[in-house]
Amino acid sequence: MATMRDWKEDRASSRFSGPLRLGLAAWLVWLFTPALLGKEPVKAKEPVKTKEAPTFTRDVAPILQAKCQLCHRRRHVGPFALETYEQARKRASDIAYVTGERSMPPWKPAPGVGPSLKHDQSLSREEIATLVAWADAGAPKGDPKDMPPPPKFAEGWKLGPPDLILEPTEDYSIAPSSPDTYRCFVLPTNLTKDTYVSAIDFRPGNAKVVHHINAFLDTTGAARKRDEADPGSGYTSFAGPGIEAYEELCFWATGHVASHLPDGIGIRFPKQSDVILQVHYHPTGKPEVDRTRLGIYFSRKPVKQALHWNAASNSDFQLPAGKPDIEIKASWYIPVDLEVLAVSPHMHGLGHDMRVVVTLPNGRTNDLIHIPSWDPSWQSSYYFQKPIPVPKGSVVKVIAHFDNSSHPRNPNQPPKLVTWGQNASDEMCEGFLAVAKKGQDLTLPRAVDDLADIFAMQRIRKMRKQMMTRPSSR
Ligand code: HEC
């Protein structure tokens, strides 16, 4: 089990792993291009003093294969393929630019902040330096013999065949010029007994249009009613699933890699519950259809701790029209000893950046994650390498900034006052955490999982307090 000390060591080692691992060539490029990590474009006008310029076949292709082709290959979500020399040569300076400003690959967490994350898809400084130096050298091809064989992308389920595959009964059509659509599909599990799950994965039917996926559990039948009331497969709901009571299951951008929860931790699917699969579709300009499938893996080992999502959230804020930099904070007092497995920041189009930290009872503050340039299209959940212990009495804090000036992501033109809400024209400020109760042992006779109820009581108390303290001026 991870301890607070492990976490500190983790953080220390991730800090060292950056600069110390840099090669000499990378250092030289780094010195000449101070903007590498900043927002400015990487111009790299200075001559790069490496022994010899990187070549496509030897140096660049392996990076594109490992970090880009997941999306930039035929029939996938990237707007063009980066598989051949010709495809990459045409875009060499764009590649240097987007990787230099770290907008591609779309891995949003700031490097080196907080505990290390699973499946970190970011580029190392060395890799960025190679791509920049290659573009500067005029994108040389190199010796064809150096070209690595094309990677084999697992076309099947990456974790092996799931125990249960859920899919909508019909295809969903995405019109060429429709706006981005958030469509919720209600998928009955038909489980005849409560079941613990150790992993959830998904496979888009049409990877060109599926941008991100959220999933929720419904035990009330409310989602089925919404589905019946909406023509076609599923129903449309932005933000959440648009029903009163549900449990969060996962939040994933394209490119997310699924993994099993640690042994002994599981997600409880009550019998006969429905999964609500919410797919964010990004139209391509052509008529498209999709039927995304969800794969569920049952826990193989006895489950002692149940996983739940809960958030440090603020639903009582105002974002005045025209203001470019508004700080909003949220906090969550930790009511029992917890272990944190994952973090998932959430805002809508006005979000600019978010930091999630935890202040321990001894007053020390540790980072959990920092998203320096928020992009709602690339929101995801980030799993820690090891669960992070967060003792009772700690406070999880969210510090977010919103930009309500006129910009392309502002849904209101001209900008207007925005408050909390579930619609695209409203805002949210949430730092979701996936947590388990420390010391919980659900294998013991009569043990019950009371964590969701503890969180629900906290929310009710918070709402009561807000109602008491707010002047009744509405
Ligand atoms: C998880 C999927 C994914 C990965 C991985 C990815 N891209 Fe992209 N890329 C996209 C999508 C989708 C777009 C279209 C713009 C958007 O939605 O942000 C894009 C756009 C781009 C653009 C055009 C940007 C612009 O502003 O016009 C470039 C250049 C690019 N990617 C290069 C790369 C490179 C180089 C890598 C690897 C180092 C990479 N991408 C990795 C999905 C991805």
Image (cartoon, rainbow, N blue to C red):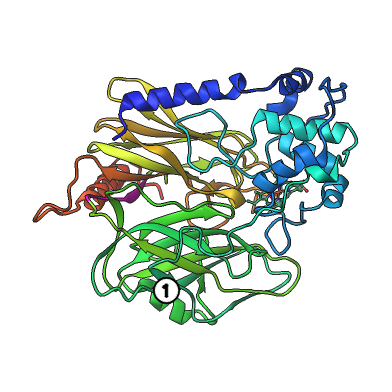
In this rendering, position of residue 224 left or right of residue 418: left
**Residue 397, x across and y down, in percent:** 40, 33
What residue do we see at 75% from left, 44% from top?
Answer: 61
Q: Nearer the viewer, residue 44 or 361?
A: 44
What residue do we see at 44% from left, 55% from top?
Answer: 250
In this rendering, position of residue 260 left or right of residue 85: left
Q: Residues within 10 Å of mark 1 (few under 14, many from 20)?
A: many
Q: Which amino acid type is shown beneath numbered disc 1? A: Leu
Task: Mark yes or no: residue 240 visible.
Answer: yes
Compared with 212, 290 (above or below) is below
Q: Is residue 201 magenta?
A: no
Find out if the beta carbon at label 1 lies less than 8 Å from the nearest ligand 1 atom.
no
Task: Mark yes or no: residue 39 visible.
Answer: no
What residue do we see at 33% from left, 31% from top?
Answer: 395
Compared with 454, 22 (above or below) is above
Predominant SS of the magenta segment: strand
Residue range corresponding to the magenta coloring: 304-310
Occupied quadrant, residue 24: top right
In this rendering, position of residue 182 left or right of residue 303: right
Can you identify the residue that label 1 sits on? 187
Secondary element at image label 1: strand
**Residue 371, x across and y down, in percent:** 55, 37
